[in-house]
Image (spheres, grey):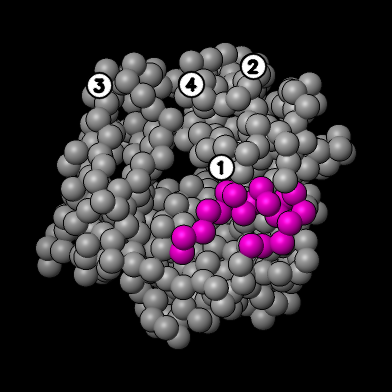
């Protein structure tokens, strides 16, 4: 195991990795921007290094400064968390070139699976179902029109680089294609510096199901079952569950086996997530692979008993996965709510500010991952998520009740959060019955009781 690891991230995921390092007896090194000088991750790490001004491009996206901090501190490895540089193959390569271990896949794997066209080809080689679409990015709008006529409507215009739900627009008719193409390309350029777009058949009102996988350097690949991530707003997840109430035994076996085949074909190492869209007949289609730890990884940890971050560190240090597929079984049900500093009444506008008073829920089956504390000033420069509320129960009904209990107790006084909105969803009959899809929020399904 490593002696010292630098965490190239901030917020709750940095705190989560610091805790995993402590569990393994590893010295943790935090990095922070000038805006995060008083952030929790910078305070609780064994060491902390300032890497630049507040804007992310000058700090958390500054590859040279992060590498310099790692080398100066004597760290042997860098854990990228999620977001920022976690899926940047150039950064992973820079880490390796400087004699450090990257806690994640090999740079070439990140590059291959981050290229949507190559990821789709990898899925096809592995015998994994994919939705009809273009073989890579289209050259321009005229090419998009020709391909759209071949694929058929409705279809999605999707960013060829990046992920996280950004750079996606739907065209239901040819008349809508131009606006969808321009909007997807523009958002992709702004978010990832790459405006290329590819086209894919749109699956009407799908379920978003993803499978957690682990691979090591010895050819071992395992899955840790599936997660339900269909409660989304504009492709941004709000509530996640494990396992999915939509999955019966046959569906679970098929989708998890497909994820493992894909990971093997990709030569995958570390923790990753294979994302699928599923229709009402339980047909599923490969969407993308996230080559990092996911925001929603705690729900998988709660139902499997596996510490995914510790496994990441062990695998990066050259150890095999610490269990086999036969060792795993599902235990109960877990739900996660992403608590964002946003105002749902104002179109989910970010609400940076100072947390004047804080109360975090507890009791049986309740976990909260957060970097917030009383008096903490939420900076306006970064993602608005301030915590993840996770509950587990013996079954889905108990987990729902525990989440409602926890949401009723949580207080972040001084800032608006999404907690009340999530309570509204959790209290609906549609959620209780599992009757939802990725467009349910936009359709107002949780506001109706029909």
In this picture, residue 225 sits left or right of residue 404: right
Instruction: Report x, y in % for residue 165.
Output: 50, 50
The residues tagged by marks 1 and 2 sit, at their Cα atoms, a distance apart of 25 Å
Circle 1 is placed at which residue position? 23
Q: Earlier along the polypeptide chain: callout 1 or callout 2? A: 1
The residues tagged by marks 2 and 4 sit, at their Cα atoms, a distance apart of 12 Å
Mark linked to residue 213? none
How many residues crowd mark 2 within 10 Å: few (<14), some (14–19), many (20+)? some
Pointers 2 and 4 in contact (CB under 8 A)?
A: no
Mark linked to residue 39? 4
Circle 3 is placed at which residue position? 357
Pointers 2 and 3 in contact (CB under 8 A)?
A: no
Tell me, yes or no, if residue 172 can be seen here. no
How many residues crowd mark 4 within 10 Å: few (<14), some (14–19), many (20+)? many
**Secondary-structure class at tag 2:** strand
The residues tagged by marks 4 and 3 sit, at their Cα atoms, a distance apart of 16 Å
Instruction: Report x, y in % for residue 59.
Output: 64, 22
Circle 2 is placed at which residue position? 50
What segment carries the magenta color? 304-322
Choose top left, top right, bottom left or bottom right for residue 8.
top right
- The quadrant of the image that shows the C terminus is bottom left
Q: Nearer the viewer, mark 1 or mark 2?
A: 1
Q: Earlier along the polypeptide chain: callout 1 or callout 4? A: 1
The residues tagged by marks 1 and 4 sit, at their Cα atoms, a distance apart of 21 Å
The residues tagged by marks 2 and 3 sit, at their Cα atoms, a distance apart of 28 Å
Residue at the farthest front position: 25
Pointers 4 and 3 in contact (CB under 8 A)?
A: no
**Secondary-structure class at tag 3:** strand
> How many numbered circles does the render carry?
4
Tell me, yes or no, if residue 38 can be seen here. yes
Which residue is drawn at the image coordinates 71% and 69% (left, top)? 220
């Amino acid at each position: 195991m490593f002696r010292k690891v630098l965490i190239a991230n901030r917020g709750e995921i940095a705190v989560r990795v610091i805790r995993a390092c402590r569990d393994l007896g590893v010295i943790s090194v935090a990095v922070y921007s000038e805006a995060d000088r008083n952030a929790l991750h910078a305070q609780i790490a064994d060491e902390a290094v300032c890497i630049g001004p507040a804007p992310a491009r000058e700090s958390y996206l500054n590859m040279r400064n992060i590498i310099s901090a790692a080398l100066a501190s004597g760290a042997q490895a860098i854990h990228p968390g999620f977001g920022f540089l976690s899926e940047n193959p150039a950064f992973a390569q820079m880490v390796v070139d400087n004699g450090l271990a990257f806690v994640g896949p090999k740079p070439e794997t990140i590059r291959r699976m981050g290229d949507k066209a190559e990821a789709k080809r990898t899925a096809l080689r592995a015998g994994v179902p994919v939705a009809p679409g273009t073989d890579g990015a289209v050259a321009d709008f005229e090419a998009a029109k020709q391909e759209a006529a071949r694929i058929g409507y409705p279809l999605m215009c999707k960013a060829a680089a990046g992920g996280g739900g950004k750079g996606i627009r739907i065209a239901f008719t040819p008349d809508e294609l131009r606006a969808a193409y321009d909007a997807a390309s523009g958002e992709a350029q702004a978010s990832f510096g790459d405006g290329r777009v590819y086209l894919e058949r749109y699956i009407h009102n799908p379920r978003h199901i993803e499978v957690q996988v682990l691979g090591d350097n010895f050819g071992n690949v395992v899955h840790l079952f599936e997660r339900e991530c269909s409660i989304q707003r504009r492709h941004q997840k709000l509530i996640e569950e494990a396992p999915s109430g939509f999955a019966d035994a046959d569906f679970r076996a098929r989708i998890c086996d497909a994820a493992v085949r894909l990971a093997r074909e990709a030569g995958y190492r570390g923790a990753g997530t294979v994302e699928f869209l599923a229709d009402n007949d339980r047909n599923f289609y490969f969407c993308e692979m996230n080559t990092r730890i996911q925001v929603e990884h705690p729900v998988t940890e709660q139902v499997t008993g596996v510490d995914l971050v510790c496994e990441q560190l062990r695998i990066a240090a050259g150890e095999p996965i610490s269990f086999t597929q036969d060792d795993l079984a599902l235990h109960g049900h877990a739900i996660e709510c992403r608590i964002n500093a946003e105002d749902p009444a104002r179109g989910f506008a970010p609400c940076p500010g100072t947390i004047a008073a804080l109360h975090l829920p507890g009791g049986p089956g309740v976990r909260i991952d957060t970097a917030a504390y009383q008096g903490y000033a939420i900076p306006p420069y970064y993602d608005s998520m301030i915590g993840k509320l996770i509950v587990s129960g013996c079954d889905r009904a108990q987990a729902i009740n525990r989440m409602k209990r926890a949401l009723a107790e949580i207080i972040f006084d001084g800032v608006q959060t999404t907690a009340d909105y999530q309570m509204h969803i959790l209290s609906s009959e549609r959620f209780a019955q599992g009757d939802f899809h990725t467009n349910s929020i936009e359709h107002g399904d949780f506001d109706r009781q029909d």
